[in-house]
């Protein structure tokens, strides 16, 4: 990418999951914002939970950079465009630094190389002292495509402990940038494979506590100095579409439906007027809806409230029965079904659009990248859910779904009339051809296909 002036920008990675990089990322975003910097957050990989927290901590939408679901060129363009309006960038890695869909392909290291930005390693040093030296040496020298310039240590409770860690850094040529002590006030509960988004958790207090503590033990000035890197030049934005009257695209967004990619929403906004609504609180779809998008989320946590909102369930059922176009993914699929069974087996009536019941009884994780080949299109995404289809009469569309290694997986794309549904969280931020095809499809009554 062509470059312009220098800005602080770095990828925060770790040797493995559980090192505390998300917690540290949130604290850094808020601490740097307190300094008056406009800080742009990013997340490597398909995670939509961490981006939710990034957005709150930074006050700016966090963007996903995923090299399986999209091309390197798209990631670079997304990064450059967002950084152009910011003073600094913080990119949170995924899993361990070199953990990709296929060896290091699509890993945090791959993203750092494609963006040309330095890496800061977050190390859980709770039970480690000078032995961190060979770990740092290996991560610094294993792959020449990245620049590991500094390290921050987590779960370090004393200055004497940090002294050993600092010496290790100096001996292997990695800048020691400080540490974060163990503190129960920094802990965010986990849910499934990511941080919880439970509204009962006091996230603002946690982020503020982190931002208060970080400057005491982490050298923020030095962090900004060693990560100053030439900023890429953003490409001109494409002109807005003109012509026919804009479509009205209704997007569910509330505590039950939060799993969205910001770039997907931006793509929808280029295809029509986006109107957000709440299946929990609103009584009807936005007037004049031409397309309905029900993203994923935690409908099982709000099953009783969703079921109790009979007016909204009736509005959505009537829209779909009348041939309305819709796409529902994961939690959205669950909501469009007949019933939702929670983990205790309690049944809650849902919208009744699709002939299926989804269940959290005996919940078992299904997880992985997915590639969907349909109608000469290939669209990629990520499957992540614990629920299952307990009883259904859904008809699969003629699509082939494979994992990151090209092996077929039993995750169909379903169709019923103009309603499409899947457990896959699709990414169309780079190429909205799939959504455009659904928008252009023939209008017909919602009969089984």
Image (spheres, grey):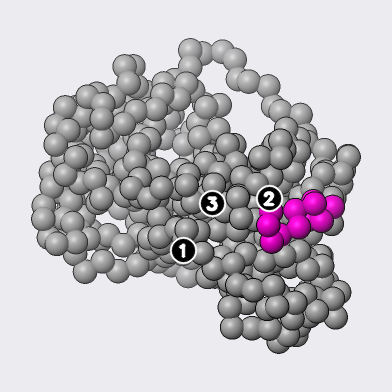
Q: Is residue 224 magenta?
A: yes
Sequence order check: which comes first, mark 1 or mark 2?
2
Q: Which residue is mark 1?
A: 184
Please give left or right for residue 114 compared with residue 101 in the image.
right
| Residue occupied by mark 3 | 209
| Left or right of residue 445, residue 124 in this image | right
Q: Are marks 2 and 3 in contact (CB under 8 Å)?
A: no
Per the model, the C-alpha gap separating discs 1 and 2 is: 24 Å
Q: Which residue is mark 2?
A: 90
Residue drawn at point x = 71 percent, y = 28 percent: 237
Across and down, in percent, residue 82 comes to 69, 38
Q: Quadrant of the C terminus?
A: top left
- Relative depth, front residue between 142 and 440: 142
Point out the stretch of residues depicted in magenta.
215-225
Contact flag, marks 1 and 2 (Cβ < 8 Å): no
Give 264 or 140, whichever is nearer the viewer: 140
Rendering quarter of residue 87: top right
The main secondary structure of the magenta stretch is helix
Label 1 sits on a secondary structure element that is: helix
Residue 8, percent across and down?
Answer: 79, 48
Residue 233 % position (x, y): 82, 38
Q: Residue at x 44, y 20 (%)?
A: 247
């Amino acid at each position: 990418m062509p470059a312009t002036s220098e800005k602080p920008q770095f990828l925060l990675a770790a040797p493995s999951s559980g090192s505390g990089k998300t917690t540290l990322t949130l604290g850094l975003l808020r601490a740097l914002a307190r300094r008056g910097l406009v800080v742009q957050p990013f997340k490597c990989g398909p995670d939509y939970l961490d981006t939710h927290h990034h957005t709150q901590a930074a006050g700016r939408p966090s963007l996903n950079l995923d090299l399986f679901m999209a091309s390197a060129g798209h990631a670079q363009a997304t990064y450059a465009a967002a950084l152009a309006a910011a003073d600094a960038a913080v990119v949170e890695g995924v899993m361990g630094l070199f953990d990709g869909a296929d060896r290091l392909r699509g890993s945090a290291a791959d993203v750092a190389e494609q963006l040309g930005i330095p890496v800061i390693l977050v190390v859980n040093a709770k039970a480690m002292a000078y032995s961190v030296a060979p770990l740092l040496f290996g991560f610094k020298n294993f792959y020449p495509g990245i620049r590991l310039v500094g390290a921050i240590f987590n779960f370090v409770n004393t200055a004497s402990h940090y002294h050993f860690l600092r010496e290790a850094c100096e001996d292997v040529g990695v800048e020691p940038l400080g540490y974060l002590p163990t503190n129960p006030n920094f802990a965010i509960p986990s849910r499934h494979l990511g941080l919880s988004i439970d509204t009962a958790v006091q996230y603002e207090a946690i982020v503020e506590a982190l931002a208060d503590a970080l400057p005491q033990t982490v050298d923020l000035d030095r962090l900004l100095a060693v990560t100053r890197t030439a900023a890429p030049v953003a490409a001109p934005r494409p002109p807005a579409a003109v012509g026919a009257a804009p479509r009205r695209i209704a997007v569910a967004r509330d505590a039950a439906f939060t799993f969205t990619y910001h770039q997907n929403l931006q793509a929808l906004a280029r295809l029509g007027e986006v109107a957000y609504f709440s299946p929990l609180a609103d009584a009807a779809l936005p007037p004049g809806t031409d397309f309905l998008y029900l993203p994923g989320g935690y409908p099982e946590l709000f099953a009783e409230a969703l079921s109790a909102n009979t007016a909204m369930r009736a509005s959505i059922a009537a829209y779909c029965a009348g041939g309305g176009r819709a796409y529902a993914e994961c939690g959205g699929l669950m909501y469009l079904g007949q019933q939702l069974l929670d983990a205790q087996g309690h049944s809650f009536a849902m919208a009744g659009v699709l002939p299926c019941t989804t269940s959290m009884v005996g919940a078992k994780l299904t997880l992985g990248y997915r590639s969907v080949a349909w109608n000469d299109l290939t669209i990629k995404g990520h499957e992540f859910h614990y629920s299952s289809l307990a009883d259904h009469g859904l008809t699969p569309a003629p699509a082939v779904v494979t994992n990151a290694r090209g092996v077929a997986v039993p995750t169909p794309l379903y169709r019923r009339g103009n309603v499409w549904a899947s457990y896959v969280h699709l990414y169309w931020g780079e190429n909205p051809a799939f959504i455009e095809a659904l928008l252009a499809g023939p209008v017909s009554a919602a009969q089984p296909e």
